[in-house]
Amino acid sequence: MKFTLDTGSIQLALSAVMSAVPTKSSLPILGNILIEADSKSIKFSTTDLEISVTTVLAIKAVKKGSIAIPAKTFHDIISALPQTEVDIEAVSNRLELRFSGGDYKISGMSADEFPKLPEVNSSKEIRIPAETINQMIQKTSFAVSGDETRPALNGVLWQTSSEKMVMVATDGHRLSHVLADNTKLQGLYDDVIIPPRALNLVSKLMTDTSQEVGIIFGENNIIFRCENNTIYSRIIEGPYPNYEQVIPKDNDKELIVNRSQLIDSVRRVAILANSLTHQVKFSISKDSLELSATNVDVGGEASEKIPCQYDSESFEVGYNANYVIDVLKQVDGEDAKFTLASPVAAAIITPTSESCDYLFLLMPLRLAE
């Protein structure tokens, strides 16, 4: 294998594929990047057996071939080099990098030892707007559970069977539900549960959201194609819990508050919240919202009042400050709307626009006596 490439192009390829290199593994080969060169392109690939990434650069190699080389070592060398052309050649499982004034050699492994990646069947690819899939990912992946005893909740549910495609994520304390028009996937595939790490990688590698993303559904995997990058991910086995039954239908109280002001106030008051529960109390009354927190361990108290729009009976409710902030960051627009029922019922949080295609659910905390 032999080709010439500038360090800038190599760095771009490495920034895409390094995300799938495991930090620790019992299989040494997984710490490597597979480099393959042919008459049309150079391909870089990495995998941790759950997620795999490839990126392709359209240049012609002087000699075809392939090799697996230590990812971190190769990345560190390329990152340290100046912007220059690099001659790269592999002979007998050793990679040599030559440039003006320098010569580096790295021991590698046979490409045959690198795990086989799923085949990409382009005939089954369906392309959907990158902006649509990116928004759905951004508004759901943050709410995925980290509890490994409930594996289905460790992923984002993607439903494509009806006129609207739906993405849902929940950790039992908060829930995100996003809708989008579905003109291409309707009825073609069953529900799938996708690891958030794969989805976040798809968002990261979308350099142009005005383009489309290719989607290929496999038997136990899903493939995303973003420009020169391909992300392969396993699918988490279900079933996913029935999330629809936990979304309240009879919340009749409406609180509208400036989103940025609420985020700032919650963040400040939470400094003196309980270190375990992070509870901030919302005391809601006519056109006034008071936020308060108490930390008996440090003997501290905090409270702030901010204006709001509210015209129902007064009541108090507690929320985890971190969850409130996480949700509010995903709400578009100047104001956020809380639709409430009681101190023990979940709140529905949305923007104030009438044509909203997403909502967030936030479970309350039991207020300390």
Image (spheres, helix red, strand yellow):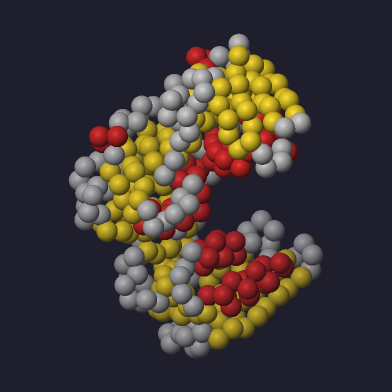
Quadrant where the C terminus sits is: bottom right
Picture quadrant of residue 83: top right
Q: Residue at x 63, y 73 (%)?
A: 264
Q: Is residue 163 visible?
A: yes
Q: How many marks?
A: 0
Q: In the displayed image of the protein, which residue is found farthest to the top?
A: 92
Q: From the viewer's perspective, is residue 93 above or below residue 139? A: above
| In-front residue for pair 29/349 | 29
Picture quadrant of residue 95: top right
| In-front residue for pair 280/267 | 267
Q: In the displayed image of the protein, which residue is found farthest to the right?
A: 298
Please state the horizontal and vertical placement of residue 257, each as a whole percent of the image. 50, 80
Picture quadrant of residue 238: top left
Please state the horizontal and vertical placement of residue 255, each as a whole percent of the image. 45, 79
Q: From the viewer's perspective, is residue 369 above or below residue 206? A: below
Along the horizontal axis of the image, is 119 left or right of 324? left
Q: Residue at x 63, y 75 (%)?
A: 265
| In-front residue for pair 369/35 | 35
Quadrant where the N terminus sits is: top right
Q: Residue at x 23, y 49 (%)?
A: 184
| In-front residue for pair 57/248 | 57
Please state the horizontal and vertical placement of residue 242, each as a whole percent of the image. 33, 49
Q: Residue at x 28, y 43 (%)?
A: 126
Q: Is residue 18 visible?
A: no
